[in-house]
Image (tube, coloured by chain):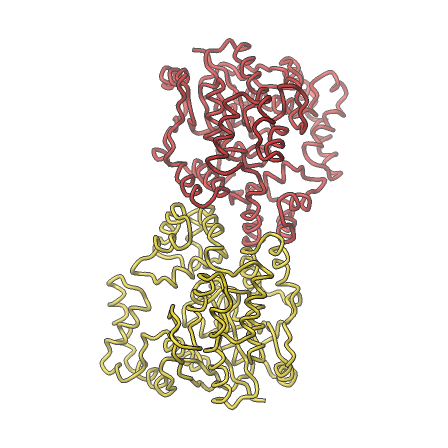
Chain colours: A yellow, B red
Amino acid sequence: MKAVGLIVEYNPFHNGHAFHLQASKEAANADVVIAVMSGNFLQRGEPALVSKWYRTQMALQNGVDLVFELPYHFAVQKAETFASGAVSILDAAGCESLCFGSESGDISAFLQTISFLQEKQGFFNENIKRHMATGISYPKAISLAYQGLSGAEKFLNLAKPNNILGFQYIKAILEQNSKLEPLTIARKHADYHDEHFASETIASATSIRKAIFSEEMESANIGQYVPEPTNRLLQQYKREYGGFHCWERYWDLLQYQLVTTNLEELKEIYEMEEGLENRLMAAALSSTNFQEYMQRIKTKRYTWTRLQRLSVHVLTNTKKTEMKSMPQKAAYLRLLGMTETGKEYLNKRKKQFNLPIVAKLSAFKEEEIIQDIKAARIYAMAFPKKIRTQMLLQEFKQPPIFVQK
Amino acid sequence: MKAVGLIVEYNPFHNGHAFHLQASKEAANADVVIAVMSGNFLQRGEPALVSKWYRTQMALQNGVDLVFELPYHFAVQKAETFASGAVSILDAAGCESLCFGSESGDISAFLQTISFLQEKQGFFNENIKRHMATGISYPKAISLAYQGLSGAEKFLNLAKPNNILGFQYIKAILEQNSKLEPLTIARKHADYHDEHFASETIASATSIRKAIFSEEMESANIGQYVPEPTNRLLQQYKREYGGFHCWERYWDLLQYQLVTTNLEELKEIYEMEEGLENRLMAAALSSTNFQEYMQRIKTKRYTWTRLQRLSVHVLTNTKKTEMKSMPQKAAYLRLLGMTETGKEYLNKRKKQFNLPIVAKLSAFKEEEIIQDIKAARIYAMAFPKKIRTQMLLQEFKQPPIFVQK
């Protein structure tokens, strides 16, 4: 059985994802689709719209065969670390290829860009430093440094978010000496950050989330952009939990955490740099919601995403020391769900895996998984009191989701 | 000008307090009444019904002339530490006497009991140890050890809560070589913990709070037990902030704090002993409200009050190391409010005070006052978002309250 790996967040699973999934399966000539998926908190520093268990169901009902969780310490991270963790999981799960969506759609462009940058590494790093010194953000500095290299225009456009991610995936494959074959599919119609619907059937997750929150989830509005299982599961989630997750639902807790923690302790939070703790504390004291707080802490130096990730680390009380002790590659495969095909694949192949499969948490007690447990518990804090208690315990009780089809 | 000192919480100020205030003024033949009052969190480990600023107004409109705050690190403490901090403040503020309410009402009984216990100290301490070994709580062990001393029946009944407090006040006066003359007034009608109204006009603060929460503050119900200013200020507080403070309003935050903090860190919280952190964490995960949580953590060894205080320290993230570094006696006099008489007294006497008066926080930056600021901010977290921000900043902006009369 041949497996293709995908790196996903499915927030939520939409028609663009369905297209990418099918195209990847064909391009890789694969029998099995394996997804490594961020847990309850995402790479951009946000709580996911619905829990990882519901997003796993969406994935399985839409064609994915196996879902593994990307641990918190890889998921809520800059592209490089995110990519490194995800690649190590797909590799350990026996995938033969990794297929990602990109604006470019041309795998040779990625490989050539990597060679080009290796040649120009000295100039490149110097350029980055020079741009950083002007007070701009790190991603912006990278982008400008790259554009400043003579000849760069012939290679990948690294101003595009999915090109950047793909670039990091391939770098991770090379660095880890992974046997994963990199493949890419050109993204259709919607740009990653688009807030407006741009096509009849394909829309970005950002625009779908926007519609969900602004329309109070009138299903008709997003029905044309998501497969039927997504729509049904979103409705079900709303009925069961009374709503969806967004930063505003965690504002009270974030504000409380900032107000309660001494400045000296805040300094120890992962990614807290250059006196940001003073800025965050002052904003917490004077803001009445998360948007206002973000506007207050925003600077030229730090991207919105970087500051949102920092705020997730504050919310989860994640320390620099904790993150320092984390391995560069995944240490386990946390199985969130499988189809019959996925199960068959696991039974055939798992003996060759070089990482343990964690199906039930109670059987596994590693420090790094404690971070995922904590993240899941904090994610549950957005629920009403009664449902919350049930969710707080779920992380230990929930077996992997099984979808028969 | 002769000043009598009172140690109070006024949660809220009721007719019993008014009686005690007048009787104390007469007994001490005083011109000025000075109260040292717990801030937003109280000795029994609870948030005060209304803020310290409103309770200060109640005090001033009901006959107190000067209100100083008892800092958090003295207020949320066992009787001994509470007494020690309060006595040091009244002494520093130039009071000639301290007048407390007690079940006994006989000051010589207190003094005799102290001598009696000094004589029997060896037996007494041994008795306490022996009782503690059976797994009961410390206050219970003290009470039994005391009753076990032959001759104790002739002295003070130390099973009564106000006798215990008074006993500690006098012990503190002796230990600090204070010139405060101890006076006591017999309490009228209501026992400290009474939950039901026992008289036409005098009721315990406990029963008044119970009525306030159960009747959703129909003022008519408590009007006969509190002076007019209290009733008016309670109504005003409700209009302004939408309700009163109780533990349930902080449950989400306490639960979040417990769930977010690693067990190793929880161990560092002040008063966390003998693996209590595991008990608190387990209760936080499975309880849907504060009452349920308290029921779960309750043991024979720890009193309800002790566990509530511990929970306040969790809520405020107060560490063992912080508390260890705190002085045994107050380091400043935080002025919350004054009448014209109080102002006159201050003007005449403050040069002789051996502690600085803190009227505006911005002029004072001691580590210990940071704890009070934090407590005030966390107290504000029970308010709706908009009011909360205003309250979060109040601690720095609010000048002492001045009542002209």
Residue B152 or A248: which is nearer the viewer?
A248
Residue farthest to the front? Answer: A220
Residue farthest to the bottom? Answer: A29
Residue A232 or B62: which is nearer the viewer?
A232
Identify the residue at horizontal 76%, vertical 38% (top origin): B134
Q: Quadrant of residue A231?
A: bottom right
Identify the residue at horizontal 68%, vertical 22% (top origin): B198
Identify the residue at horizontal 52%, vertical 15% (top origin): B97
Q: Quadrant of residue B331?
A: top left
Residue A101 visible in this rendered orientation of the protein: yes
Residue B333 visible in this rendered orientation of the protein: no
* Above or below B39: residue B402: above
Q: Is residue A274 left or right of residue A259?
A: left
Q: Position of residue B371 (x, y in %)?
A: 46, 38
* Above or below B304: residue B262: below
Q: Total of numbered circles in the picture?
A: 0
Q: What is the quadrant of the N terminus of chain B in the image?
A: top left
Q: Position of residue B350 (x, y in %)?
A: 38, 19
* Above or below B372: residue A206: below
Residue B184 or A227: which is nearer the viewer?
A227
* Above or below B365: residue A273: below
Q: Position of residue A364 (x, y in %)?
A: 63, 67
Q: What is the quadrant of the C terminus of chain B in the image?
A: top left
Q: Position of residue B5 (x, y in %)?
A: 50, 18
